[in-house]
Structure formats: C-alpha cells, structure tokens
Image (cartoon, rainbow, N blue to C red):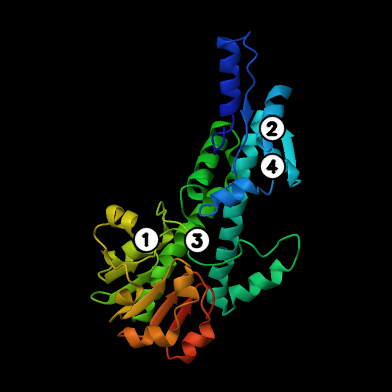
C-alpha cells in the first residue's frame, strides 16, 4: 500500500489473505509515500523518511532491498505494524493541514487588530519546536490530499467511536474554506461593496505552483466566487489552464499573463508561481491594467513596493 486509506484497511486485507491462503506464506507490507506534487521524482529518490508497516521479516527485507539507494543515503526508517503505518500517513497530512489553518486563524485575528500575520509567523517560526514551514497565511490548502484526508480521517474516527479525538479537524476544514471566501470579500471591499461588471485578472488556477492539479483548488474557488458576484473574471496560469477550462467553462481564460492583466480593474494573486511573485513588477502590471487594486491571496508580494507604485494592496492578515 502507498496512499492514504482508512485506518484498518491493511489489517482487513491481511486477515483476508490469511483466510484465503493460510499456507501460502504471504506477508503484507504497507509503505506510505510522502511525495509532494511537483517533486515526486526528487522525493522518491531522496525521501526524508521511510515507513514500513509489515506483518513479517520477509516483507521488511523486501522493502529494504527496494530502498537500497535510500539506505545508502542513511534515510531514517521506521518499522511498525500495519495500523501504525496507516496512521503515520494520515496524521502527517492532518498535522500539516492543522498548521496551515492555525496560521490562517491568526490571520483572521490580525485583520481585526491591525497586526501583521507574516511578522507573527516569522517570530513564532524561530522557535525550533514550531518551525517556519507551512506558516504561510493565505487562501489555504487544496489539492487531492489534504482536504480529502482530513474529512476522511474525521469520518473514520467517528466510525471507530473516537470522533471527539479529531473533532478539531472540522474546524481546520472550516477555517480553510473561510479564507477563500475572505479573498473574494477583500476584492469586493476594495471596490466599495460591488464587483459587478469589473474586469478581474486572477493569477493562478492550480492549487499550488509546480503543478497542473486543480482538484479543490482555492485559486479557482476564488475565481468562481467572484464570477458569481457578477465580475468579469479572466484566469491565467502557466500549467493548469487545460484542466481549468474543462472544470469551469464559465470562466474566461488567457494563456498569456499580460493579456490577462490588460485593462483589468483589479488583480488577484491566488497561486504563487514565480511568474507572478518574482517576475511581475508593480510598474509593469500598472502599465497594463485599468485599475490599481491588487489582492495578494498568498502574501507573497512585496507590499511596500506595490504601494509605492500606486497600488491599493490587500493581503491576508496583513495591511
């Protein structure tokens, strides 16, 4: 096994094998993967840890042969029973989702107090017990793993009679969805309460950079919300437009970034591709757009530089 499954799946499979082929000497291994989309080859060749859930020594030996290269790199290995290996995978994803939603909850507080969530994240991230990774406030997580996994984990815990143990994951999910809505609200607020008829350039469609995956994409969720409010939404993305066009044909798409920016009344950055966060200057954008409103849904732009160029800048939990 490799991917996230409800805890108990591997044990049920093991018991099935024992019932149907008790004398075959079959051992089951559960080897969860921890690949990041866009870095699958790198993470396969150089994993940060290996987890072997096994039912016997032969299964473990086989896995050690498969990962001989990783052992040569002294990759840490954890050997466990089947349910522990399953829990490692889902609990890792649940923890990452929780960390993201925690900083986004702090962004909600920062917005009403005038604090800067980016500075807050830097400060607490210096604590080695916390760390800075995954403390980037914005419009939250998406994709085919984290949202699905935390919902499935909560449901499985209910089935096991321990729903209260992970009840917090429902709030993690709720915070995540609220931040998408908040990005759309920031655009509406910037226009004084209505976006009907406004041309809005949405920079990004994939749920994260270095991927063409649009599953549960926060970027497209924001675009669809703005479209529903009557805006003329133009979406651009360097990799994901072929998928986005099929999933959301009601939106307008432009392959070229500058064409998408042309005559826009506002710009919304929702996927932190380098083409937007590093290579797009506020002066260049201003030469193309009709208005100078930018909503930074990933808090990845230099707010001072955009303001100095005459833009009305709005971030997520930062002024």
Report if the CB atoms under discs 1 and 4 are less than 8 Å apart: no
Residue at the spot of label 1: 220
Residue wearing tag 4: 69
User: Which picture quadrant has residue 80?
Assistant: top right
Q: CA distance from mark 1 to mark 2?
A: 43 Å
Position of residue 38 measured from the top left corner of the image (x, y, whole percent): 51, 54
Question: Residue 117 has which mark?
Answer: none
Residue at 52 percent across and 44 percent down: it is 149
Q: Which residue is mark 3?
A: 140
Rendered image quadrant of residue 311: bottom left
Question: Secondary structure under badge 4?
Answer: helix
Q: Cα distance, mark 2 to mark 4?
A: 9 Å
Q: Nearer the viewer, mark 3 or mark 4?
A: 4
Res. 65 mark: 2
Of callouts 2 and 3, the N-terminal one: 2
Element under disc 3: loop
Q: Residues within 10 Å of mark 1 (few under 14, many from 20)?
A: many
């Amino acid at each position: 096994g490799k991917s996230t499954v409800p805890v108990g799946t591997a044990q049920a499979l093991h018991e099935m094998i024992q019932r149907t082929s008790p004398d075959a000497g079959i051992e089951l291994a559960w080897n969860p993967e921890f690949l990041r989309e866009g870095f699958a080859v790198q993470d396969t060749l150089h994993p940060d840890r290996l987890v072997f859930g096994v039912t016997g020594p032969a299964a473990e030996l086989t896995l050690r042969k498969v990962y001989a290269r990783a052992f040569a790199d002294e990759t840490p290995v954890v050997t466990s029973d089947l349910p522990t290996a399953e829990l490692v995978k889902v609990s890792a994803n649940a923890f990452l989702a929780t960390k993201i939603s925690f900083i986004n909850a702090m962004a909600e507080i920062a917005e009403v107090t005038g604090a800067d969530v980016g500075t807050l994240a830097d400060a607490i991230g210096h604590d080695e017990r916390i760390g800075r990774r995954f403390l980037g406030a914005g419009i939250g997580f998406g994709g085919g793993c984290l949202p699905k996994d935390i919902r499935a984990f909560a449901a499985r815990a209910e089935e096991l009679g321990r729903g209260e143990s992970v009840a917090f994951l429902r709030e993690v999910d709720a915070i995540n969805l609220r931040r998408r809505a908040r990005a759309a609200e920031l655009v509406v607020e910037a226009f004084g309460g209505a976006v009907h008829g406004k041309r809005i350039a949405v920079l990004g469609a994939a749920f994260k950079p270095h991927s063409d995956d649009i599953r549960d994409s926060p970027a497209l969720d924001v675009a669809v919300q703005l479209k529903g409010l009557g805006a003329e939404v133009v979406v651009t993305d360097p990799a994901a437009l072929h998928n986005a066009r099929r999933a959301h044909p009601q939106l307008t798409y432009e392959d070229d970034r500058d064409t998408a920016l042309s005559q826009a009344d506002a710009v919304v950055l929702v996927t932190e591709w380098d083409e937007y966060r590093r290579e797009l200057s506020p002066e260049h954008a201003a030469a193309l757009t009709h208005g100078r409103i930018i909503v930074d849904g990933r808090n990845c732009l230099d707010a001072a530089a955009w303001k100095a160029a005459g833009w009305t800048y709005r971030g997520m939990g930062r002024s």
